[in-house]
């Protein structure tokens, strides 16, 4: 009987076989996992954060890599507050999304609506030491804007200009200039063909064209030489002689040479005129201030307000890093108080009569007026009071005022305030209140209600408060204050801007106000004097009213992007007409002589050279210029 | 001869369709990540991060399937299918979450490595559990419980020794020299993984040659010895292959535990910071 | 039952064992039961029967036979009275698995099986009970039986469940006649045979016939006539009932046992199918006037009801829709047979099933070894369901790629149930699961010894008997009767490699094992 193979189990057991336990490896796995968690937690507690880190940070941030709280906040991720500790120490919010919108569109309302994008959303860290944090892939821009260069809209300056001739009168300033005429003149004088004659005036230094100025460009020996022209004799009661000006001791850098003046028969004339002649400028400003005092004062006030704002920013530019615990806390308390006050005022807005009509100060003035003593001024005071009351009780129109209406209103209120100052010049308290009111009225922007103003300042105070609180909490954790070096750039730029504003302010000196407003005859006479005074200027290049607006010579019209001429000059081998073809026919200064985005797309179209957003645009207005 | 319709098919019905769809999806995502890169914390990265975390949590429930089967998914077979398919989708989600870039940093790198390792060992397990049972079923006659192999081997050995007991000296010597040692204990070999009858012909050849040299009366014994020895070899094959199936867990499960631990840390760090 | 503890049950059993005294020939001679034996041969026959015959005594209220039990004995009342109780509402019952009362005495729950599981394990199947005692169809009807009466023979011969509970009223003395002895008696005593057949004919055959779907709509009068004219045959294991090629002259209905249906192919027989009780054969051959297309062979002790050709023809004349059905079924059968003949190897599984005894199984666990990863989750799940001890072992016979582990097959004729002294192993009437009530099992291991496949295992409970030996109970697969989701082994296999099939369902068997 052969032994057959067993199919199945050779030897069957008599008992049940209890299966082995399976959970062993699961337990091991979970145990090991738990160990790992505990280990990493321990590391974190003692400060070794490297195993938890998502990767090395860029080399610029390497010094602060060991402390996670320098950038990360508990429960808040990588908050902008932490970035701003170093990159925006003065709290100017120049790197915020709002700043970007403002810088780009110039529209404050849009800036306020812009929302807040996290810095870390585009500037992604932990990608290694060599990762260029400042360079952003243009795919991120596509998130809000268009995705390829082919979809780029036309330049705004061309969009808003008229369809014929592409003019932008308000941009160019007020000078008369004809390219076509100048081409002919250069050809005649120096025998250079049109296409090659651009460089005669536009100095190319290898990277870009130097800014144009009369002295260097126009006033050379062979072209517009001044000095042989003279003014008409002008009446001395309308214009001031140099000695009179010197006697005024007005602030500013005015220089006069007496031998250039001829005074006879109560009239003065200047025999040697220069470009931007100081005597003409001074007198034109003076006459202008008498012809249109309101406008003059307004311009001044605007400049003063700007200066005050800049000075305030400068004072605030003490970064939080420089403050110790005590002062931080003091600032926190002060901000909280300010916030409370603003909140109270906002709440009071609810019961306001109508938007934009906070009349509390007006009431104060009303009462002051009522308290004026008997005398001549009393009648005037009553007059003013009647005006005020009429205004106050008048129906305030619904909705926002248009630009002209706003200006008209503003003028009215300014006029009222001026009368007030005149009526009671010695009352200091009243003067302060009037000043405050005047500043506020000056700083009103069309379309802005006072509520909006309050809310924006509330937002600003709130963000400052957040920064102070964050700084306090960080100090408590033992994080050292942020480095100050990046602040210097900000401070410098503020200082520069303040200086510029101040310079413009000194060009508009403060005049004593005239005794009586001008009547029509006197006005016409004065206007005649002004015309005669500026005759030479007008005949040459300038249009009238030059005193109102200064000429911006060939200012770059691109507000939101940069443009460097050098690669383009190289590529076209100096052929300016390639991009500016209409310049040979251009007869007016207002003409832009540029074809627009289409001409850029010829070379920079999609897939062509340099079509990344960053080739021309900045996100942050001052980025790269620390 | 594989089973009839009554049992689940060896190759799932929609494997092809699922594979094509998944590959297409992955390719689409990979290509789009080149043009529109994303960070793991935004957009598709975040969505797939959530998905991956949720799927990992589900995968980790697998060891408790016997207790949960009454509430979800009904049978352990469904649990295993879900575990395998969702495991692959989890790995794909992890790739999409990372934006198809290799992560920087120790934590991210470890997570990626562990995910890849766990999924790959899982897929290795899938292959093993398709291949080994059919090798065992089709290639062998004996079927034993792993724990009972020593006992059954003892019985075989006793049987062989009894057989040899009352035989000629020649046969006894042959048995002592050639067979006794290997009959003493089970010996595993990786070769059985690829051929379940590996080495059998060579081993039995010895017996066949021996049968030439014994008396005709003992031919039957030699044949019986061959049968017993074949069964012993089959026990070896059973032992090897079942060991592989059991030891495979060492590759997969501890790594999964580590992965879950790191995942917890990863999520905690993300929430807190 | 739960009020009585195990020790008491064990004691009673031991007592009864002592009383199980083989009867002496002298005592037997005088009984009316054996009056039919021919005089000359009586002593010899009684001598042979003796070992299967016992005296048993029951006290008042003791249960002799329980309804639903499987019994292998007939009982002859020597003295005393017994009471027959049945609470049948009808003779059909749909199987609804019911929980046994748990150890804490909680009330049993009614569960509805899920349809997917029901098909898998045979829950929810129809079954029927034959009454072997004339009982009226009223609730709580009682019948008393006196000296000289015999009961329990149908259940024993046909291996159906006992139809009614038989209790002893007062003290009774019974003669227990076990099945081998019963058979012997039937063969040698024509009178006894007639007696048994008459009782079957009168009491059981009509309901049996009515439960065959062929005759379900036939009117009662016709059936009564059938009753009288039908022949009742018995066969021994291996006996050929009909031969292939002979003229088909009768319709057979299987009363009990298994019949093998095979065709000749080459030198051997190809098994086409097998018949179990309640199934019938021959209708196609009679309808189409063919010779027998296959051989019928008895696989064990088989009882058949034979209806002659003429009677069958008359039946068809009376019920024409039956004829239509038969034509349809006949065509299907021819197809099946044809496919078997074309592909002999494919019917190998039937051979295997018959040889290994799988055909008895109503819920056989099969494991596909080509898919099974040997992870033991099935055993683990079984253990978890049953308090830490599994109820089967993953060892067994291997057929092709199928493993048939030693898990209870829930046989149609559960031999394990025949000798349980306490009734701990039972099958609820109309259900599939043969379950062991642990509290009443005294560990006599009769069931474990009877099971031909060793599917019942004795396990220790941890208790210790008064004499120092450990208490054992029998345990076996109970189809996870306490689980609403059904068998844990099937549900918990991660590969889906386990399956339970009912070998009654030939189609399912073919698709699985072919």
Image: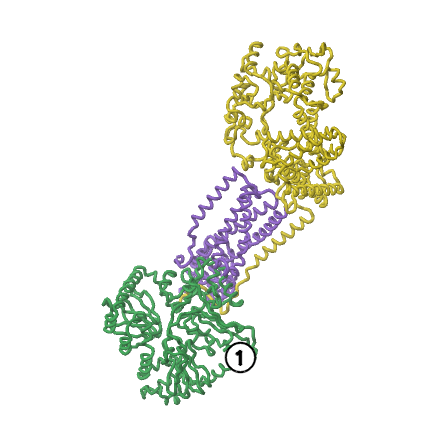
Q: Of residues A335 and C219, which is closer to you in this image?
A: A335
Q: Secondary structure at mark 1?
A: helix
Chain given the colour green: C
Chain given the colour yellow: A
Chain given the colour purple: B
Residue C468 in the image: state x and y as whole percent. 57, 78
Q: Of residues A269 and C510, which is closer to you in this image?
A: A269
Please say whether residue A168 is visible from this viewpoint.
yes
Please say whether residue A7 is visible from this viewpoint.
no
Quarter of the figure with residue A180: top right
Dot 1: chain letter: C
Q: How is the image coloured?
A: by chain
> What is the tally of numbered marks visible in this picture?
1
Quarter of the figure with residue A106: top right
Q: Residue at x 56, y 48 (%)?
A: B114
Residue ID for mark 1:
C7
Q: Of residues B231 and C409, which is closer to you in this image?
A: C409
């Amino acid at each position: 009987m052969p032994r057959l193979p067993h199919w199945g189990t050779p030897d069957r057991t008599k008992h049940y076989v209890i299966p082995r336990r399976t959970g062993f490896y699961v337990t091991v796995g979970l145990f090991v996992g738990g160990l790992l968690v505990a280990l990493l937690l321990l590391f974190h507690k003692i400060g070794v954060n490297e195993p938890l880190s998502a990767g090395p940070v860029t080399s610029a941030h390497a010094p602060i890599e060991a402390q996670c709280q320098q950038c990360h906040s508990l429960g808040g991720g990588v908050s902008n507050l932490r970035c701003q500790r170093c990159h925006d120490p003065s709290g100017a919010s120049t790197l915020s999304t709002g700043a970007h919108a403002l810088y780009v569109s110039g529209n404050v309302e849009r800036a306020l609506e812009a929302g807040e994008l996290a810095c870390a959303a585009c500037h992604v860290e932990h990608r290694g030491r060599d990762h260029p944090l400042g360079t952003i892939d243009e795919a991120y821009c596509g998130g809000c804007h268009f995705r390829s260069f082919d979809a780029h809209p036309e330049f705004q300056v061309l969009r808003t200009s008229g369809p014929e001739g592409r003019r932008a009168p308000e941009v160019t300033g007020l000078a008369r200039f004809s390219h076509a005429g100048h081409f002919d003149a250069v050809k005649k004088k120096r025998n250079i063909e049109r296409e090659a004659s651009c460089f005669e005036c536009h100095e190319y230094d290898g990277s870009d064209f130097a800014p144009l100025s009369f002295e260097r460009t126009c006033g050379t020996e062979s072209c517009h030489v001044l000095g042989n022209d003279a003014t008409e004799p002008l009446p001395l009661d309308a214009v001031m002689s140099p000695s009179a000006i010197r006697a005024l001791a007005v602030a500013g850098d005015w220089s006069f040479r007496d031998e250039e003046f001829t005074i006879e028969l109560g009239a003065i004339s200047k025999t040697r005129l220069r470009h931007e002649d100081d005597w003409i400028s001074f007198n034109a400003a003076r006459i202008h201030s008498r012809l249109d005092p309101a406008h003059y004062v307004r311009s001044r006030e605007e400049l003063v307000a700007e200066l005050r704002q800049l000075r305030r920013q400068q004072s605030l530019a003490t970064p939080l890093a420089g403050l110790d615990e005590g002062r931080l806390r003091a600032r926190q308390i002060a901000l909280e108080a300010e916030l409370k006050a603003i909140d109270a005022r906002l709440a009071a807005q609810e019961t306001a009569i109508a938007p934009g009509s906070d009349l509390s100060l007006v009431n104060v003035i009303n009462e002051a007026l009522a308290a004026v003593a008997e005398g001549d001024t009393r009648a005037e005071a009553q007059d003013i009071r009647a005006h005020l009351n009429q205004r106050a009780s008048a129906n305030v129109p619904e909705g926002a005022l248009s630009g002209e209406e706003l200006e008209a209103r503003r003028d009215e209120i300014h006029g009222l305030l001026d009368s007030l100052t005149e009526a009671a010049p010695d009352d200091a308290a009243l003067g302060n209140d009037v000043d405050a009111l005047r500043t506020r009225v000056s700083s009103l922007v069309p379309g802005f209600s006072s509520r909006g103003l309050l809310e924006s300042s509330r937002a600003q105070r709130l963000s400052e408060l957040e920064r102070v609180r964050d700084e306090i909490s960080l100090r408590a954790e033992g994080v050292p204050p942020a480095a100050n070096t990046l602040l210097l750039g900000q401070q410098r730029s503020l200082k520069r801007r303040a200086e510029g504003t101040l310079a413009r302010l000194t060009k508009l000196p403060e005049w004593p106000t005239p005794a009586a407003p001008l009547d029509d005859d006197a006005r016409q006479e004065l206007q005649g004097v002004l015309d005669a005074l500026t005759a030479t200027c007008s005949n040459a290049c300038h249009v009238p009213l030059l005193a109102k607006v200064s000429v911006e010579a060939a200012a770059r019209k691109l507000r939101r992007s940069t443009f460097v001429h050098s690669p383009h000059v190289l590529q076209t081998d100096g052929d300016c007409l390639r991009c500016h073809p209409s310049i040979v026919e251009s007869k007016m200064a207002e003409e832009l002589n540029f074809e627009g985005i289409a001409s850029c797309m010829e070379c920079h179209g999609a897939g062509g050279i340099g079509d990344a957003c960053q080739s021309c645009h900045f996100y942050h207005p001052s980025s790269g210029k620390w | 001869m594989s089973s009839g319709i009554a049992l689940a098919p060896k190759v799932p019905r929609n494997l092809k369709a699922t594979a094509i769809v998944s590959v297409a999806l992955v390719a689409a995502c990979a290509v789009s990540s080149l043009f529109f890169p994303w960070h793991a914390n935004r957009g598709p990265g975040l969505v797939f991060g959530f998905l991956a975390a949720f799927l990992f949590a589900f995968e980790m429930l697998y060891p408790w399937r016997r207790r949960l089967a009454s509430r979800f998914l009904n049978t352990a077979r469904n649990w295993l299918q879900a575990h395998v398919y969702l495991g692959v989708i989890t790995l794909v989600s992890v790739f999409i979450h990372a934006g198809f870039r290799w992560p920087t940093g120790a934590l991210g790198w470890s997570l990626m490595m562990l995910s890849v390792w766990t999924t790959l060992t899982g897929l290795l397990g899938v292959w093993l559990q398709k291949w080994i049972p059919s090798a065992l079923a089709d290639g062998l006659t004996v079927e034993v419980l792993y724990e009972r192999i020593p006992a059954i081997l003892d019985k075989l050995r006793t049987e062989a020794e009894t057989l040899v007991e009352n035989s000629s000296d020649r046969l006894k010597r042959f048995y002592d020299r050639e067979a006794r040692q290997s009959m003493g204990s089970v010996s595993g070999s990786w070769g059985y993984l690829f051929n379940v009858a590996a080495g059998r012909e060579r081993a039995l050849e010895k017996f066949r040659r021996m049968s030439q040299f014994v008396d005709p009366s003992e031919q039957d014994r030699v044949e019986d010895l061959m049968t017993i020895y074949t069964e012993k070899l089959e026990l070896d094959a059973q032992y090897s292959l079942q060991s592989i199936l059991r030891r495979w867990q060492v590759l997969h499960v501890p790594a999964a535990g580590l992965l879950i631990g790191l995942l917890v840390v990863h999520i905690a760090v993300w929430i807190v910071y | 039952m739960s009020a009585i503890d195990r020790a008491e049950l064990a004691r009673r059993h031991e007592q009864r064992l002592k009383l199980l005294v083989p009867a002496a020939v002298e005592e037997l001679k005088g009984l009316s039961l054996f009056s039919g034996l021919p005089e000359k041969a009586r002593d010899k026959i009684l001598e042979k029967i003796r070992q299967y015959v016992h005296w048993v005594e029951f006290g008042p209220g003791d249960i002799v036979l329980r309804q639903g039990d499987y019994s292998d004995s007939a009982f002859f009342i020597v003295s005393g009275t017994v009471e027959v109780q049945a609470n049948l509402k009808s003779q059909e019952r749909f199987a609804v698995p019911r929980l046994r009362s748990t150890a804490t005495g909680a009330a049993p729950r009614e569960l509805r099986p899920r349809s997917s599981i029901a098909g898998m394990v045979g829950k929810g199947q129809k079954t029927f009970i034959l009454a072997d005692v004339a009982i009226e169809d009223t609730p709580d009807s009682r019948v008393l039986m006196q000296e000289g009466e015999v009961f329990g023979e149908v259940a024993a011969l046909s291996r159906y469940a006992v139809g009614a509970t038989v209790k002893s009223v007062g003290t009774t003395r019974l003669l227990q006649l076990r099945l081998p002895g019963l058979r012997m008696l039937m063969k040698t005593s024509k009178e006894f045979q007639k007696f048994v057949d008459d009782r079957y004919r009168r009491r059981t055959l009509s309901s049996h016939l009515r439960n065959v779907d062929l005759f379900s709509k036939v009117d009662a009068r016709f059936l009564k006539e059938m009753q009288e004219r039908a022949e009742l045959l018995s066969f021994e294991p291996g006996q050929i009932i009909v031969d292939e090629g002979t003229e088909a002259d009768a319709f057979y209905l299987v009363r009990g046992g298994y019949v093998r249906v095979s065709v000749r192919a080459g030198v051997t027989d190809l098994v086409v199918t097998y018949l179990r009780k309640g199934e019938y054969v021959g209708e196609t051959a009679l309808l189409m006037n063919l010779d027998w297309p296959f051989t019928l062979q008895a696989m064990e002790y088989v009882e058949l009801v034979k209806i002659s050709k003429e009677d069958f023809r008359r039946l068809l004349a009376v019920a024409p829709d039956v004829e239509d059905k038969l034509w349809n079924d006949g065509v299907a059968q021819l197809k099946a047979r044809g496919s078997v003949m074309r592909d002999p190897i494919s019917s190998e599984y039937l051979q295997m099933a018959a040889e290994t005894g799988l055909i008895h199984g109503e819920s056989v666990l099969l494991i596909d070894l080509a898919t099974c990863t040997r992870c033991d989750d099935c055993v683990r799940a079984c253990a978890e369901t049953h308090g830490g001890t599994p109820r089967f072992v993953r060892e067994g016979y291997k057929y092709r790629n199928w493993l048939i582990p030693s898990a209870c097959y829930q046989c149609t004729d559960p031999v394990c149930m025949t000798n349980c002294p306490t009734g701990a192993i039972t099958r609820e009437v109309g259900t599939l699961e043969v379950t062991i009530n642990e509290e009443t099992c005294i560990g006599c291991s009769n069931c474990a010894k009877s099971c031909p496949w060793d599917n019942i295992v004795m396990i220790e409970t941890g208790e210790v008997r008064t004499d120092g030996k450990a208490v054992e109970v029998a345990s076996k697969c109970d189809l996870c009767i306490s689980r609403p989701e059904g068998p844990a082994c099937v549900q918990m296999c991660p590969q889906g490699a386990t399956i339970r099939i009912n070998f009654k369902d030939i189609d399912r068997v073919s698709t699985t094992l072919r």
